[in-house]
Image (cartoon, helix red, strand yellow):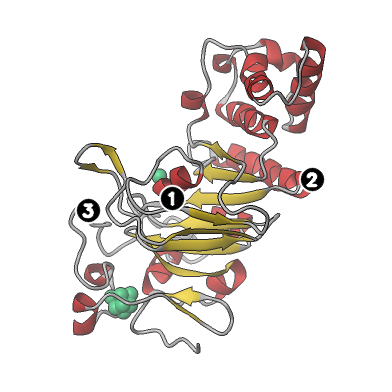
Amino acid sequence: TFDVSAPWLNRVVERKPRQLLQAVDDVSFSVPAGGCLAIVGESGCGKSTVARLVTGLYRPSAGDLNFANGRDGKTLRAQMIFQDPYASLNPRWSVKNIIAEPLRELKLRTGAAEITERVEELLRIVGLSPSDGEKYPHEFSGGQRQRISIARALASEPEFLVCDEPTSALDVSVQAQVLNLMRELQDRLGLTYLFISHDMSVVHHMSDRVAVMYLGRIVEEGDTEEIFARPLHPYTQLLLQTIPNVRTPNRDREPANGEVPSPLNPPSGCTFHPRCPLATARCSSEAPQIRTSSSGARIACHMVDVEE
Ligand code: SF4
Ligand code: MG
């Protein structure tokens, strides 16, 4: 298990002086080694901030992000896969150079022949052909570009992949192909995923555990099948209504009951209370603590009884 905890990053993540990016407060979760934890929530809930903290792209300006994976307390060989592969691939580099860069930088392969051999192997692993190495990113479709960024991420031999909405820019049919590839690679290479998504269908397909985030906090966490069968938190229930089903195939997939409030000015008490159908007076004054049930699920809501 990889345990990640950010006990008090509340309002301390900054992009520029005085510009708040996203508060993340008391976020901690465990990712089963060789498994997949999905972090789900609408945009503006802090999912991407957590992804960037885990991979070291953002540094908290106060507080600590802790990792524990049984071996070594502070380091994690994590790589990130982004939503928009085009923006993360250097357009002036050949695909071969893009994939070879981490091999050279980390000295995982030395010598031109060895590097070429490994690049070709990585291209094959992600379902591209070795000759694609000579081409440039603009010569590929969106799905192929995402395969290239997966190959580049795998080049550094990570144990942990953080995937931030990796397929949400792709067409639905291509999306399924890339997700299936990612699952296949997970089995084959024993990878562990932290998978960020706003799409509950994708989360159901990909993850073993789910953490639901709302305004910088985890409000429910548990086994994927359990949460989809019996969502306890009102926000999780709201997100699940966005999955199209037989009765409402064409429904708007945006969650109802208004939008996520600005993290700059969060509501008092339970920050979900302005949108919550179960809210009581207590909810607007007192923030619920996250509690763990006997079955290992965690939930932060005054109205849900947890057998501790
Ligand atoms: Fe709704 Fe209250 Fe539970 Fe928050 S604490 S989710 S407002 S019932
Ligand atoms: Mg995001």
- Residue 188 image label: 2
Q: Residues within 10 Å of mark 1 (few under 14, many from 20)?
A: many
Q: Residue at x 56, y 85 (%)?
A: 294
Could you tell me if the residues under marks 2 and 1 are in contact, i.e. CB atoms within 8 Å? Answer: no
Q: Nearer the viewer, residue 31 or 301?
A: 31
Helix, strand or loop under label 3: loop
Q: Residue 36's quadrant in the figure?
A: bottom right
Could you tell me if the residues under marks 3 and 1 are in contact, i.e. CB atoms within 8 Å? Answer: no
- Check the image and report above or below for 203 versus 85: below
Q: Earlier in the sequence, mark 3 or mark 1?
A: 1
> Of circles 2 and 1, which is in front?
1
Q: Residue at x 25, y 79 (%)?
A: 279
Q: Residue 71's quadrant in the figure?
A: bottom right
Residue pointed to by mark 1: 50
Q: Earlier in the sequence, mark 3 or mark 2?
A: 2
The amino acid beneath tag 2 is Arg
- Give the alpha-carbon distance from disc 2 to disc 1, as whole Å: 27 Å
Q: Nearer the viewer, residue 293 or 229?
A: 293
